[in-house]
Amino acid sequence: MPYSAKVIDHFIHPRNFGKIKNPDAVGEAGNPVCGDIMTIYLKIGKKKIGGNPREFIKDIKFETLGCAAAIATSSMVTELAKGKFLEDALKITRMQVADELGSLPPIKMHCSNLAAEALHKAIGEYRKRKG
Ligand code: FES
């Protein structure tokens, strides 16, 4: 099964690729089988909703050293997470990332782990830092 047009598009033109200077959090995920690695950088903002401040992903960038599927899923996860409240971003799953890309070949499904995992780790690190 070949890659979908969306996977190829995100691989050739990755969204939010790069580093954030002075990030509020960093999350890293690696695939021990292939050795591929992904890093997510976050900047967190606050919005007042009903008088209560809520934290959201103000900016997000990624660096991925990996296959086409790993780069496309990294790019897609940043698009899905940008602007979301942290608790909503934590609900993003690998399946959702793969679905948004119009699915991945079955042997490439494991590559989608990296993106969601690195995002969840970055949010976890941010919360830990804040105590
Ligand atoms: Fe390593 Fe895709 S082959 S993440």
Image (spheres, rainbow, N blue to C red):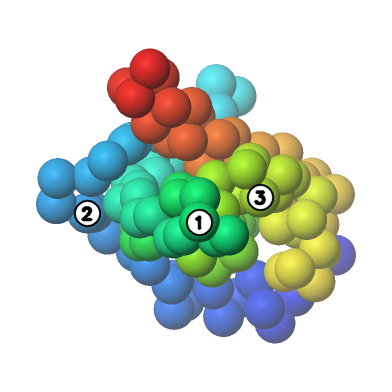
Q: Nearer the viewer, residue 98 or 82?
A: 82
**Disc 2 residue type?**
Ile
**Mark 3 within 8 Å of ligand 1, using the beta carbon:** no
Q: Nearer the viewer, residue 92 or 67?
A: 92
Can the viewer see residue 36? no
Residue 78 percent across, percent down from the top left: 50, 60
- Mark closer to the observer (2, 1): 1
**Disc 3 residue type?**
Asp
Q: Which residue corresponds to mark 2?
A: 20
Identify the secondary structure beneath mark 3: helix
Q: Which residue corresponds to mark 1?
A: 51
Above or below, 101 relative to 64: below
Q: Which of the two discs, 2 and 3, labels the residue nearer the N terminus?
A: 2
Q: Residue at x 31, y 51 (%)?
A: 43
Q: Which residue corresponds to mark 3?
A: 88
The disc at residue 96 is none
Identify the secondary structure beneath mark 1: loop
Q: Residue at x 58, y 59 (%)?
A: 50
Query: Farthest residue in the left direction?
Result: 21
Q: CA distance from mark 1 to mark 3?
A: 19 Å
Query: Farthest residue in the front direction?
Result: 51
**Disc 1 residue type?**
Gly
Residue 119 percent across, percent down from the top left: 52, 41
Q: CA distance from mark 2 to mark 3?
A: 21 Å
Q: Nearer the viewer, residue 18 or 26?
A: 26
